[in-house]
């Protein structure tokens, strides 16, 4: 999925798979590094998982950072990254 939201028992999760694509040799993807720095720059605590960011209240969420993360990666670019990673996985 490109992006998703889930209401869990203790928190809300926003999934932004696109920011985790494009890492080289198992390293962090540049978009994931940007996201972490941008979130922390808001002064909000970053509760970031493997592919999501979690928060308990809307006030804890940096909606502007989430919006910018989605804007920075158009769906066509996400699809291209996804297809490239699938092709690379098949070669391995």
Image (tube, helix red, strand yellow):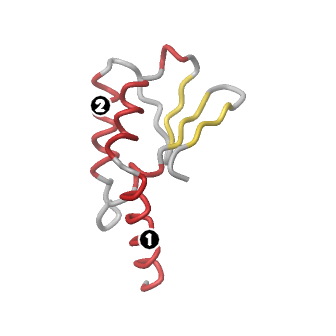
Q: Quadrant of residue 91?
A: bottom left
Residue located at (56% from left, 17% from top): 57
Which of the numbered marks, if any, corresponds to residue 83? 1
Q: Quadrant of residue 89?
A: bottom left
Residue at which label 2 appears: 38
Residue with the most extreme top position: 59
Q: Is residue 51 above or below residue 92?
A: above
On the image, the x and y values in percent for residue 2 come to 50, 50
Q: In this view, does 62 lie above or below 83?
A: above
Residue located at (29% from left, 65% from top): 24
Q: What element carries label 1?
A: helix
Verify CB contact (< 8 Å) between mark 2 and mark 1: no
On the image, the x and y values in percent for residue 61 come to 47, 22
Give the left or right position of residue 91, taking residue 22 as reference. right
Identify the mark nearer the N-term, 2 or 1.
2
Residue density around tag 1, few if under 14, some if 14–19, many if 20 or more, within 10 Å: few
Residue located at (36% from left, 30% from top): 65
Q: What element carries label 2?
A: helix
Residue density around tag 2, few if under 14, some if 14–19, many if 20 or more, within 10 Å: some
Q: In which quarter of the image is residue 43?
A: top left
Residue located at (34% from left, 34% from top): 68
On the image, the x and y values in percent for residue 58 come to 53, 17
Quarter of the image that includes the C terminus: bottom left
């Amino acid at each position: 999925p490109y992006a998703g939201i889930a209401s869990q028992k203790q928190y809300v999760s926003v999934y932004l798979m696109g920011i985790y694509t494009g890492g080289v040799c198992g390293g962090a993807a540049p978009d994931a590094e940007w996201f972490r720095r941008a979130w922390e720059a808001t002064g909000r605590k970053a509760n970031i998982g493997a592919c999501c960011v979690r928060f308990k209240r809307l006030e804890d969420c940096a909606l502007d950072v989430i919006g910018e993360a989605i804007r920075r990666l158009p769906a066509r670019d996400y699809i291209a990254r996804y297809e490239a990673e699938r092709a690379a996985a098949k070669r391995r």
